[in-house]
């Protein structure tokens, strides 16, 4: 893909500094742990790890491509062969579930440090692969790598505080936020901190802009679309949603509903607990719904869109070469086609040529009857059904209107994963398909 | 102090209004003994004399317009609220918070003890004072009792003990309907407001006139004299240039059209496909090896005849009108398009039989 010169200058050079950084990071960690006196074993482990990283750094800077540490070819091939949208979605869901269920284990500092080191090491070993490096080191994509780590860190911090608080609540102690409610002054404490942050961020942006300049491309043309054509990184979740829906739904209705739902959240929430302090146990429902919507339906889709969608919006493994000629069988059919032609074995109901507007609409509604029935049942029958079954307690506490708003927002949010699953399993394109009026769902 | 902070806006206003009346009544005593007031403002507020803080707004700005500033209203409201309920702890802290009491180092009433000495106040000492036990800022629950202990006297007395400075007495303006025009005209300032008002009128008239002209100019901008667009009707050569089964892509860059010679529903025809994906309007690419149009944005795929078969595109690509011109060349008209889902591809204007 690239010449050796590019690789040695850019990637291997970067990897040398990268491994050295990991080594220094772990050396400092080992020193801190050593001074604590009771963590000698961990201090030893991390100092050994730092030594190994130092060796990796010198190998990466050796100037010979074959010396750069890299993931074995067999593993890369296996990952490429296994990866696909289905496995990616199921895998990320599985990882998030494991992180949630065993959160008490993962919030331990040493466990988190191990996970961080392993992920950094895997990233470095993968970056020695030229295809992977070309994607990850693209100036557009660097912030998304940073985003993944930043998000993981902040989630970890919040989860740790929530776990501590949950434990204290169980023992009948006040939460940490109540114990340490020491406050500081806006001036000078906060303003000074903000000033320092401002200067640091400005410096970072300057350095970033110098070393990773935005790519300049040819003038835009309405008849020339870059391949792959990607939205800004924060919209890649939207772009992935658009693969499964008509633009009016995934581009207009769902994003508006996201904003509306975020605004409605405080009014729907009847749980008085967890106000002003971190807690998971006391707000399990809110926590899980939020994390599902944010991580599963937004962040993982951004990562998928950034790193794993290549030319023609095909799915590519992380170590796969992005060829525009990759052939993937993605044929899909609408539900009416499926229902009338495949299952009922008769042609689609179609209005005669000279039919009036009303009779044409009648034919269209008849053709779309199965889809309309399914969606009607989903949005009209399901909420009351849930009110008397799984959400009985919620309905009693929230009242009719609030419950209806909440259940409909939840059901509309769930249309995305459901539609994805239907596309993968049944090759279903649209449940309701009225191209005559640009109404597809 | 928690309940102190929770005073709603309505409470503050109500308290301020109640206080304003009492200020108006007690204006004379306030003006007579005003000498002490500035000192009280600059120095530490004596704890034994909490009324100083309470009446200061009235004294420092003795009803010049009959309407206190927002800060004063707030101060009065804070003092006034402690009044009926006789909550003594209310007074010391608001006094310290007043911005007009220039950086009064602390509100700690114990330390000051009535002596009016001019303390040199540099930043370091203010910070030191702020960092030490008595914070003027947020107070945690643990600190609250210490602050509230040295209770000042209830504010009820403030009217009698108000310190102030002699000032030429002003006529007390009785409440009148100020909104009526007559009242404005009587006032000497009526002239001012009249002229300013007319200036405003002139200004806004000019502004709206300019805005209107600008909008007209902007509207004209959308109808340029010259359109730098390729013509919507153009010729692409004779039929023989388009052999069977070939998708001609050389007109994409200039005209945004594929010219295809292929079989559609049993008829061998030449048609012009619009290079706009029916999903979100990107330009698909023709992949010769796979014999399909493939959109780079969301992966929609179309057969050679323009029918959608993969990805999210909800309907087939559109056709432009095509015909044979007088000179025998194929002529494409981009002003008309034909959609398959509306049954328009049966229209003979949408294709030329090969």
Image: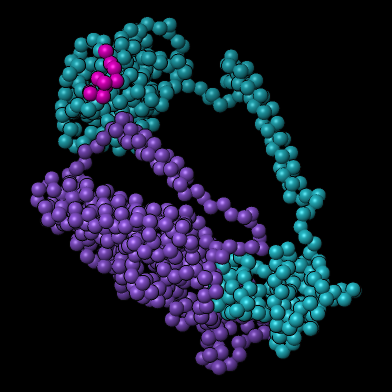
Chain colours: A purple, B cyan
Residue B227 in which image quadrant: bottom right
* Left or right, residue A361 beside residue B234: left
The span picked out in magenta is: B120-129
Q: Can you give x and y, in whole percent of width and height, for residue A101 in the image?
A: 24, 66
**Residue projecting furthest to the left:** A38
Q: Can you give x and y, in whole percent of width and height, for residue B225 in the image?
A: 81, 49
Going 38% across and 56% down the picture, which residue do you hit? A63
Q: Can you give x and y, in whole percent of width and height, for residue A298 in the image?
A: 41, 62
- Asked if the magenta segment contains residue B128, the reply would be yes
Residue A390 shows in this picture = yes
Q: Nearer the viewer, residue B305 or B242?
A: B242
Q: Looking at the image, is A203 positioned above or below residue B279?
A: above
Q: How many marks?
A: 0
Q: Can you give x and y, in whole percent of width and height, for residue A123 in the image?
A: 34, 61
Going 29% across and 20% down the picture, which residue do you hit? B123
Q: Looking at the image, is B130 positioned above or below residue A228?
A: above
């Amino acid at each position: 893909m690239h010449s050796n010169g590019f690789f040695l200058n850019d990637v291997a050079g970067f990897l040398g500094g990268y491994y050295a950084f990991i080594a220094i990071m772990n050396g400092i960690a080992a020193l801190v742990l050593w001074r604590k006196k009771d963590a000698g074993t961990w201090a030893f482990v991390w100092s050994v790890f730092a030594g190994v990283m130092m060796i990796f750094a010198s190998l990466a800077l050796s100037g010979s491509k074959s010396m750069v540490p890299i993931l074995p070819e067999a593993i890369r091939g296996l990952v490429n062969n296994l990866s696909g949208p289905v496995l990616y979605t199921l895998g990320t869901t599985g990882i998030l579930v494991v992180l949630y269920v065993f959160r008490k284990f993962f919030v331990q500092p040493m466990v988190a440090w191990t996970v961080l080191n392993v992920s950094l090491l895997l990233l470095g070993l993968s970056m020695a692969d030229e295809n992977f490096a070309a994607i990850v080191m693209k100036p557009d994509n660097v912030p998304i790598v940073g985003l993944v780590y930043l998000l993981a860190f902040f989630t970890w911090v919040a989860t740790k505080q929530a776990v501590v608080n949950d434990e204290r609540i169980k023992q009948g102690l006040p939460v940490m936020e109540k114990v340490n409610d020491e406050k500081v002054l806006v001036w000078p404490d906060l303003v000074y901190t903000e000033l320092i942050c401002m200067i640091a961020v400005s410096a970072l942006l300057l350095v970033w802009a110098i070393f990773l300049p935005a790519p300049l491309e040819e003038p835009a043309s309405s008849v020339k679309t870059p391949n792959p054509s990607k939205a800004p990184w924060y919209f890649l979740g939207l772009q992935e949603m658009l693969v499964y829906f008509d633009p009016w739904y995934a581009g207009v209705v769902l994003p508006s509903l996201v904003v509306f739902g975020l605004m409605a959240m405080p009014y729907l929430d009847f749980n008085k607990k967890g106000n002003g302090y971190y807690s998971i146990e006391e707000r399990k429902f809110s926590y899980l719904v939020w994390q599902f919507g944010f991580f599963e339906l937004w962040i993982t889709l951004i990562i998928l869109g950034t790193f794993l969608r290549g030319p023609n919006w095909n799915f590519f493994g992380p170590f796969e070469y992005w060829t525009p000629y990759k052939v993937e069988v993605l044929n899909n059919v609408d539900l009416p086609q499926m229902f009338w032609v495949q299952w009922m074995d008769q042609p689609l109901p179609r209005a005669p040529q000279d039919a009036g507007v009303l009779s044409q609409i009648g034919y269209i509604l008849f053709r779309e009857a199965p889809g309309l029935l399914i969606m009607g049942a989903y949005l009209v029958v399901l909420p009351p059904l849930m009110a008397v079954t799984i959400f009985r307690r919620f309905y009693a506490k929230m009242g009719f209107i609030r419950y209806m708003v909440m259940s409909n927002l939840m059901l509309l949010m769930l249309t995305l994963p459901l539609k994805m699953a239907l596309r993968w399993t049944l090759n279903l394109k649209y449940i309701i398909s009225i191209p005559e009026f640009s109404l597809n769902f | 102090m928690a309940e102190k902070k929770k005073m709603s806006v309505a409470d503050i206003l109500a308290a301020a209004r109640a206080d304003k009346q009492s200020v108006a009544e007690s204006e004379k005593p306030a003006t007579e003994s005003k000498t002490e007031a500035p000192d009280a403002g600059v120095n530490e507020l004596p704890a034994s004399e909490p009324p100083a803080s309470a009446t200061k707004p009235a004294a420092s700005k003795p009803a010049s317009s009959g309407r206190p500033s927002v800060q004063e209203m707030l101060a009065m409201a804070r003092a006034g609220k402690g009044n009926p309920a006789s909550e003594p702890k209310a007074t010391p802290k608001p006094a310290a918070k007043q911005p007009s009491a220039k950086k009064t180092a602390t509100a700690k009433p114990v330390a000051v003890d009535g002596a009016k000495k001019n303390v040199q106040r540099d930043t370091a000492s203010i910070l030191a004072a702020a960092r030490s036990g008595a914070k003027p800022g947020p107070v945690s629950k643990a600190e609250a009792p210490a602050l509230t202990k040295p209770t000042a006297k209830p504010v009820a007395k403030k009217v009698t003990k108000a310190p102030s400075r002699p000032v030429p007495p002003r006529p007390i303006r009785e409440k009148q309907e100020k909104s009526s025009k007559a009242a404005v005209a009587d006032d000497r300032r009526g002239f001012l407001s009249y002229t300013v008002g007319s200036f405003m009128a002139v200004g806004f008239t000019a502004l709206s006139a300019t805005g209107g002209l600008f909008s007209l100019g902007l509207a004209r901008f959308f109808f340029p004299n010259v359109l730098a667009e390729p013509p919507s009707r153009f010729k692409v050569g004779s039929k023989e240039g388009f052999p069977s089964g070939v998708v001609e892509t050389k007109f994409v860059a200039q005209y945004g059209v594929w010219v295809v010679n292929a079989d559609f529903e049993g008829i061998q025809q030449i048609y012009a496909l619009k290079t706009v994906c029916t999903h979100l309007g990107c330009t698909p690419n023709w992949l010769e090896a796979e014999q399909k149009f493939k959109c780079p944005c969301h992966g929609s795929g179309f057969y050679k005849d323009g029918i959608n078969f993969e990805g999210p595109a909800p309907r087939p690509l559109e056709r432009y009108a095509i015909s044979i011109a007088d000179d025998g060349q194929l002529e494409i008209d981009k002003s008309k398009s034909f959609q398959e889902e509306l049954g328009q591809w049966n229209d003979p204007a949408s294709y030329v039989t090969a």
